[in-house]
Image: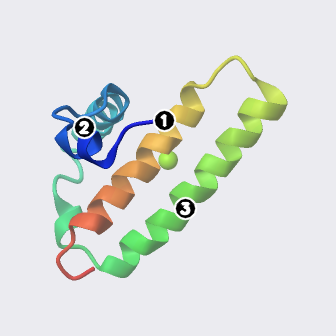
Amino acid sequence: MLSRKQIEQRKYIRPEIMFVAKEMEKTMRKHDGSKGDSWRTCDIFYLMEKLIEEKNEVENAFDNLIYHDFKDGGQFRGEIVDLANVCMMLWNRKDG
Ligand SMILES: [Mg+2]
């Protein structure tokens, strides 16, 4: 276990966080042509609806992973990334 001082002195971002962030960016870029940065100015209630929608997609993908196709985590990970992106959008909104 790390001490508080060791934790505060940590100079790097965990590789696991960077990996997810890169996947988030890839997904955002896929939609740049059609949606761009519309998340910055759209109705914030729309983003809250998207949050619930993506959460449900994660649950469905989890069910598929566990009960139907345990070996393919790609769909599950993709939905996790979608959910993380909506969380990122909400976190960054000034009116949130
Ligand atoms: Mg999705």
Identify the residue at image location x=61%, y=25%: 73
* Residue 64: % across, % down: 74, 35
Residue 45 vs residue 96, the one in the foreground: 96
Asked if the beta carbon under badge 1 is closer than 8 A to the nearest atom of ligand 1, the reply is yes
Looking at marks 3 and 1 on the same chain, the residue that comes earlier in the sequence is marked by 3
Residue 66 vs residue 27, the one in the foreground: 66
Report the side of 61 relative to 41 (left or right). Answer: right
Q: How far apart are marks 3 and 1 (CA)?
A: 14 Å
In terms of secondary structure, where does tag 1 sit? helix
The picture quadrant where one finds residue 63 is: top right
Looking at marks 1 and 2 on the same chain, the residue that comes earlier in the sequence is marked by 2
What kind of residue is marked 1?
Gly
Which mark is nearer the camera, 2 or 3? 2
Q: How far apart are marks 1 and 2 (CA)?
A: 12 Å
Q: Residue 25 carries which label?
A: 2
Asked if the beta carbon under badge 3 is closer than 8 A to the nearest atom of ligand 1, the reply is yes
What kind of residue is marked 3?
Glu
Label 3 belongs to which residue? Answer: 53
Identify the residue at image location x=16%, y=57%: 37
Identify the residue at image location x=18%, y=67%: 40
In terms of secondary structure, where does tag 3 sit? helix
The picture quadrant where one finds residue 75 is: top right
Quarter of the image with the N terminus is top left
As drawn, which residue projects farthest toward the top? 71
